[in-house]
Amino acid sequence: MTCTSCSKDIAVGSKFCYNCGAKQPESGAPGLSPATGANKRLMRSSTDKKIAGVCAGLADYFDMDPTIIRVLWLLLLICGGTGLLAYVILWIVLPIAPGGVVPTSATVTTT
């Protein structure tokens, strides 16, 4: 798949370009997973994670850039302190995505 903005190669089904951050056009029906065609489920990411994959999983579920979710989470942590408690709860409660399924927020670059 090629980014519509910078024309660089990105992973099939990506919502955002890894290189320039541009939102990519929808490829399937809204609310359905492009990989399986089934309804989306809220899960922790098994591939695009920094600590536990909670932010990447939320970004995939809400079709947002994972960096935006991470920044919002950091603001919650700094401003109210509730971000840490919510993160730990989601870390425990959310199931991890299967290893073979590539989340829509994860991208792969080729050289």
Image (cartoon, grey):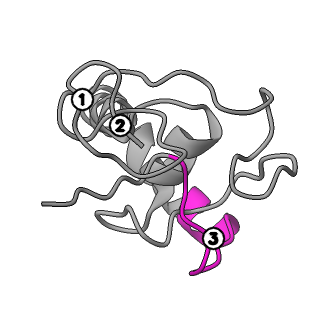
In the rendered image, residue 98 lying in the magenta stretch gets the answer yes
Secondary structure under tag 3 reads loop
Marks 2 and 1 sit apart, C-alpha to C-alpha, by 5 Å
In the rendered image, residue 74 lying in the magenta stretch gets the answer no
- The first of marks 2 and 1 along the sequence is 2
Q: Neighbour class for label 2 at 10 Å: few (<14), some, many (≥20)? A: some
Check the picture and name the quadrant holding the N terminus.
top left
Say which residue label 1 marks: 7
Tell me residue 76's x, y (percent): 36, 31
Q: Which residues are magenta?
A: 90-104
11 vs 50, left or right, is right
**Residue 46 to residue 13: above or below:** below
Q: Nearer the viewer, residue 62 or 73?
A: 62
Q: Nearer the viewer, residue 24 or 90?
A: 24
**Residue 37 to residue 95: above or below:** above
Marks 3 and 2 sit apart, C-alpha to C-alpha, by 25 Å
Check the picture and name the quadrant holding the C terminus.
bottom left
Q: Which mark is residue 2?
A: 2
- The first of marks 3 and 2 along the sequence is 2
Tell me residue 19's x, y (percent): 18, 37
Q: Neighbour class for label 3 at 10 Å: few (<14), some, many (≥20)? A: some
Mark 3–mark 2 CB contact (< 8 Å): no
Q: Residue at x 64, y 41 (%)?
A: 61
79 vs 94, left or right, is left
Amino acid type at mark 3: Ala
Q: Nearer the viewer, mark 3 or mark 2?
A: 2
Tell me residue 5's x, y (percent): 27, 18
Amino acid type at mark 2: Thr
Marks 1 and 3 sit apart, C-alpha to C-alpha, by 29 Å
